[in-house]
Amino acid sequence: MLLKTVYAFGLCRQEARGLDLVDLRSNPKAKAFGRVGGLFVRHGKSSRGSAPKRRTVLTVPEFDWIVELIEHYLTEVRPMFVPREHRAFWVTERRGRMSLRSINEAFEHARAAAGIDPELDLHSLRHSYVTHLVEFDYPERFVQEQVGHSYASTTAIYTGVSDDCRNRLLQRSLTAPGLDLWEPES
């Protein structure tokens, strides 16, 4: 669940670790997502000498599958850890907040089980999130805000669109009104 949440909201490891139950946000413009309309990130990477950056990451329709999974985790899975009044979103069997190391180990285990390249790390999920938002045609500024980057150039480094996406963009441009340059494949 934690890894899926990292991907569905484009979180860094520290941001995921720092989530508390009170960080769930409803979105009045997306009532279908209920209390999982977004996540309030309080532990974003800080600039030198500054407090951690805070932002709300909205749930996007392409990742709406996360809503049901988080609801299941909160109602069925988390209570099995008997967290009592612990505020942490991700708790351990010892009723504590998950450590950064245990988050890394969870990713390494999932990566090995899936047979994914060992060079990929947890941060690769954040890069995938950015790339997918770009491929879904979200505006660059929206993507930048979602991941909490101060500069568009930082977000651009995270982006690596697929050939399919690049061809769709090219086709859209070439079939714009007044242009008749695109010849579809037979």
Image (spheres, rainbow, N blue to C red):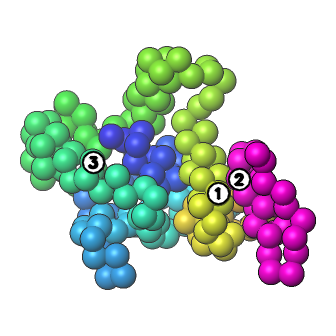
Amino acid type at circle 1 is Glu
Secondary structure of the residue carrying tag 1 is helix
**137 in relation to 162, above or below:** below
Relative horizontal placement of residue 95, taking residue 65 as reference (left or right)? left
What separation in Å lies between label 1 and label 2 (alpha carbons)?
Answer: 6 Å
Q: How far is disc 2 from disc 3 in space, using C-alphas?
A: 28 Å
**Between 1 and 63, the one nearer to me in the picture:** 63
- The residue lying at 21 percent from left, 45 percent from top is 73
Q: Left or right: 186 with respect to 4? A: right
Q: How many other residues sit within 10 Å of disc 2, few (<14), some (14-19) or many (≥20)?
A: some
Q: Residue at x 19, y 47 (%)?
A: 72
Q: What element carries label 3?
A: helix
Q: Where is residue 160 in the image (x, y as percent from the top left)?
A: 73, 47
Q: Mark 3 points at which residue?
A: 69
Q: Mark 2 points at which residue?
A: 165
| Res. 26 in view | yes
The image quarter in which residue 118 lies:
top right
Question: Looking at numbered disc 2 in the image, what kind of residue is underneath it?
Answer: Cys
- Pointers 2 and 3 in contact (C-beta within 8 Å): no
Whether residues under marks 1 and 2 lie with C-beta atoms below 8 angstroms apart, the answer is yes
Nearest to N terminus: mark 3 or mark 1: 3
Q: In the rendered image, which residue does mark 1 sit on?
A: 135
- Give coordinates of residue 122: x percent, y percent: 54, 36
| Residue bounds of the magenta highlight | 157-186
Coordinates of residue 95 in the picture (x, y in percent): 19, 38
For mark 2, give the secondary structure.
helix
182 within the magenta span: yes
Comparing labels 3 and 1, the label whose residue is closer to the camera: 1
Question: Residue 5 appears at what percent x and percent y?
Answer: 40, 48
Which amino acid does the dot numbered 3 rest on? Leu
